[in-house]
Image (cartoon, grey):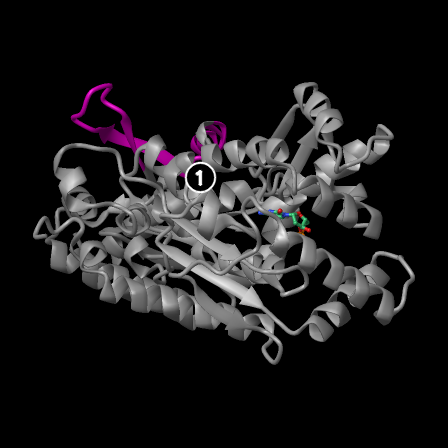
Amino acid sequence: MSYTEDMAKLEALLFVAGDPIAIDDIGTLLEISRDEALGMLEQLKRRYQRDPLSGIVLREIEGAATLATNPGLSNTIEAYYGKIREQKLTDAAYETLAVVAYNAPATRAEIETVRGVNSDSVVARLIERGLVREVGTLETPGRPALLDVTEQFLLDFGLQSTRDLPPVDLMMYDTLTKFTQQTTKESQGVAPKPLVIAIDGPSGAGKSTVARLLSEHLGILCLDTGAMYRALGYKALQQGLEPSDPEAIRAMLAETTMEIDLSDRVQRTLIDGTDAAPYIRTPEASRAASDISVLPVCRDYCVRIQRELGKRQALILEGRDIGTYVFPDAPVKFFVTASPEVRAQRRLKDLEKAGTHTTLEEVLKEIEERDRQDSGRELAPTKQADDAILIDTSDMNATSVVDAMISAIRDNEREQPAWRSYGGGCV
Ligand code: DC
């Protein structure tokens, strides 16, 4: 068989296959050596690259080769496949794909630990779309399935292999769980505790913004605990109750259901099934939140939910008492603050954006009153934990605060022998 004929056959094979063909299989089919197959693939690749009239490119993926359309033509291709492509992947799907790619082969339980939410339905949809597949089972009780990304995923994302993925902090299951795991417990088969990062501080210090950015960077969900007190304070106001009346609030809480939905990364704080978000950022709701949060019955109600959530998944919690009361054992704690004037300026901006008109003096007065109440109360006041890292954000933007947090997390990781040796079994 001549070289010219082999080249034509190679192109025909790749064309009809659609999916990538293993290079060894190409060698067998054309009755040539692996090196000869690789040489011909290189030739074909160059031919497509040189030809400005070609809409085809040759891609090599993990020991296999395939034909694909030139990425520059994606608009035309997308127009043709309009209907399929219109079904864009959701954020949850992208995130799950990333978790699978970084941890492959990964079980559904590992994916859930990293994402912090049950991901079974997202995984099922990704399997249907041919982006994830089962590659085996783990030899443990229940024999959970092991999942990996498919060649289609590599193609769609322009990767030759998942090894080409850039490193992303804490996207990996092992890294995530090692923070809090003691090797002794590990050797006894105790399930690892998910990582908790506590961010406490007074209002307007920038906690929410940095918690959100840190959450995006680390790929860990984030819980705004203030929203829970705000939602309860708002409900009390709606019912004409005095938020600081312990008996009235006790009765109200007995009739209240609160659910926290973090599945889409945007927190939904559902009070009796309704998302409270649109109503809880007013000055009245802020006052009501501060008043109601003084009551032990209200704190018990919220802290129970917060601890449950932190037990199930890695979580960044922002609030006032996370490092001192809710999770005193959290391995990473920050206390974020700023001068009252700077905090008032920030809060004023937020209120104006939300269409609430007030003055800087009013806001400053309200902030100082709330500070007094939040840090003066008996149970779980706003307080820096002894082992928390203090960050004064008065002259810092959010990005530099997050950078400081990440380097503190890294330093901590280096300094803590228990963290470093987890998995190595040498403590
Ligand atoms: O963080 P924020 O401004 O949304 O909080 C509203 C109020 O809720 C705040 O004045 C005090 C209270 N709170 C609390 O007592 N404990 C928390 N962990 C979070 C908030």
Cβ at disc 1 under 8 Å from ligand 1: no
Magenta run includes residue 228 = no
- For this view, does 98 lie left or right of residue 360? left
> What residue is pinned by disc 1?
310
Viewer-nearest residue: 309 or 130: 309
Corner quadrant of residue 263: top right
Disc 1: CA contacts within 10 A as few (<14), some (14-19) or many (>=20): many
Choose between 378 and 63: the one closer to the eye.
378
Q: Residue at x 74, y 42 (%)?
A: 277
Pick whichever, 236 or 398, lies toward us: 236
Q: Is 301 placed left or right of 109 in the picture?
A: right
The stretch in magenta equals: 121-147
Residue 52 visible (yes or no): no
- Residue 167 place in picture, x, y as percent: 34, 62
Q: Nearer the viewer, residue 70 or 96?
A: 96
* In the rendered image, the vertical position of residue 180 relative to residue 35, given as above or below: above
Residue drawn at x 10%, y 52% is: 427
State the SS at label 1. Answer: helix
- The number of discs equals 1
Q: Please, what is the three-letter code of the amino acid marked with disc 1?
A: Gly
Figure check: 42 above or below 127: below
Task: Where is residue 5? Give x, y as percent.
Answer: 25, 54
In the picture, measured across the screen, residue 323 lies left or right of residue 19, that is: right
